[in-house]
């Protein structure tokens, strides 16, 4: 379930009281410095502990070559998390940024190494284009490190305005995305 089926509800992003839609959020988590697996597990645990967020699925762990990064940048560990949430997009963004900060994430160069990176890829069918956030994520359709684990947990996934994840993957080089079946996460 992604949005409320009630056509009488206007912009559900601003509902108060008990009526808030349940949206499926897809988040990409990555880490390439420090204890990468522990950073991912901590991020997943923090999301699972968030009121109004229920984890639905977590992909396998993938080791990935950094994209648009300086030579010598360490490889990432990446996962996709699917979660049902009744949080507004603004509150969910606030929460993921707080989780990143708790793991020492320093904002600045978007391609710099990081202890924990948490990106909102889609949140229901919400479209957003502000200084703080663009939904769907503006580069997700070009990123094998997002699409490969996403397809694993949802073979029918669609990026609004871009198409099916499986179709988008057909045009990408996935050689830099390797499943790490020896690494596991709990949720």
Image: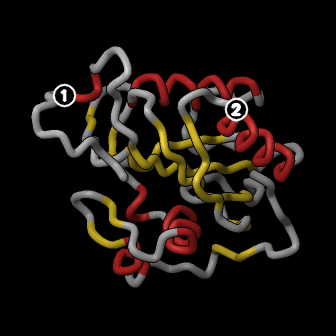
Q: Can residue 114 be seen here?
A: no
* Image position of 163 with respect to 94: above or below: below
Q: Can residue 50 be seen here?
A: yes
In this view of the protein, which residue sits in the foreground, 92 or 10?
10
In this view of the protein, which residue sits in the foreground, 55 or 172?
55
Q: Residues within 10 Å of mark 1 (few under 14, many from 20)?
A: few
In this view of the protein, which residue sits in the foreground, 159 or 76?
159
In the picture, the disc for residue 177 is none
* Image position of 62 with respect to 100: above or below: below
Left or right side of 124 for 12: left
Residue depicted at x 46% and y 23%: 91
* Count of numbered circles in the view: 2
Residue depicted at x 29% and y 27%: 13
Question: Mark 1: which secondary structure?
Answer: loop
Q: Residue furthest left?
A: 8
Residue depicted at x 35% and y 80%: 167
Position of residue 49 measured from the top left corner of the image (x, y, whole percent): 70, 32
Of the numbered discs 1 and 2, the one sitting upstream in the chain is 1
Q: Which residue is mark 1?
A: 11
Q: Which residue is mark 2?
A: 49
Q: Residue furthest top?
A: 17
Position of residue 93 measured from the top left corner of the image (x, y, whole percent): 48, 29
Position of residue 134 measured from the top left corner of the image (x, y, whole percent): 33, 38
Question: Mark 2: which secondary structure?
Answer: loop
């Amino acid at each position: 379930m992604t949005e409320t089926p009630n056509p009488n509800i206007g912009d559900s992003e601003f509902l108060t009281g008990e009526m808030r839609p349940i949206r499926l959020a897809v988040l990409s988590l990555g880490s390439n410095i420090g204890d990468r697996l522990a950073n991912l597990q901590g991020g997943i645990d923090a999301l699972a502990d968030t009121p109004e967020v229920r984890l639905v699925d977590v992909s396998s762990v993938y080791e990935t070559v950094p994209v648009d990064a300086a030579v010598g940048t360490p490889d990432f560990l990446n996962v996709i998390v699917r979660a049902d949430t009744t949080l507004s997009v603004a509150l969910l963004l606030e929460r993921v940024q707080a989780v990143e900060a708790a793991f020492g994430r320093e904002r600045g160069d978007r391609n710099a190494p990081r202890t924990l990176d948490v990106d909102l890829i889609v949140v229901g069918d919400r479209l957003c284009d502000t200084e703080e956030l663009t939904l769907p994520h503006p580069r997700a359709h070009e990123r094998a490190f997002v699409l490969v684990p996403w397809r694993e947990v949802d073979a029918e996934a669609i990026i609004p305005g871009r198409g099916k994840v499986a179709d988008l993957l057909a045009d990408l080089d996935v050689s830099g995305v390797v499943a790490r079946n020896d690494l596991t996460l709990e949720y």
